[in-house]
Amino acid sequence: MWVNGPTSRARLRFLKLIKEDEDLDAALEVARQQVENGAQIIDICMDEGMLESEQLMADFLKLIASEPDISRVPIMIDSSKWSVIEAGLRCVQGKCASSIRSA
């Protein structure tokens, strides 16, 4: 099973797109590329001090749900904040995992 780690290039590119550009469509393409390259689960983390993490997590997961080629793989909601995980769980359809990291 392939899950992106916190320092992977895809994760860093994803965070740059979200943090600097707030470009959810480009971030969606990162997720699509991961699936096309064999990812069996997509790990999504919106932990960044400058972000509205709960809203961004919900918005991004709704986008993923509308993309059949991405939403066919399970989602891992990854955060150090329970409120972000809860927001994500409300939006995921089907298989999901969650990971909470202590600060």
Image (cartoon, grey):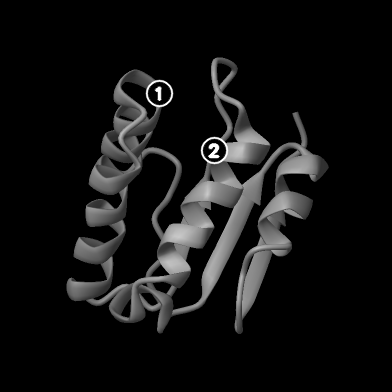
Element on which disc 1 rests: helix
Element on which disc 2 rests: loop
| Location of residue 40 in the rendering, given as x and y in whole percent from the top left corner | 38, 78
What's the residue at 30%, 54% (across, down)?
28
Mark 1, residue position: 19
| Location of residue 102 in the rendering, given as x and y in whole percent from the top left corner | 77, 37
| Above/below status of 8 relative to 53 | below
Between the C-alphas of marks 2 and 1, the distance is 9 Å
| Above/below status of 18 relative to 74 | above
Badge 2: few (under 14), some or many (20 or more) residues near its Cα, within 10 Å?
many
Q: Is residue 50 left or right of residue 103?
A: left
Q: Quadrant of residue 101?
A: top right
| Location of residue 60 in the rendering, given as x and y in whole percent from the top left corner | 47, 51
Using the image, tell me which numbered label, if any, was put on residue 53: none
What's the residue at 65%, 70% (across, down)?
97
Using the image, tell me which numbered label, if any, was put on residue 46: 2
Q: Is residue 101 left or right of residue 21?
A: right
What's the residue at 80%, 42% (across, down)?
83
Q: Nearer the viewer, residue 72 or 41?
A: 72
Q: Is residue 82 left or right of residue 42?
A: right
Report the amino acid beneath label 2. Met
- Which badge, 2 or 1, is on the more N-terminal residue? 1
| Location of residue 19 in the rendering, given as x and y in whole percent from the top left corner | 40, 23
Q: Quadrant of residue 72?
A: bottom left
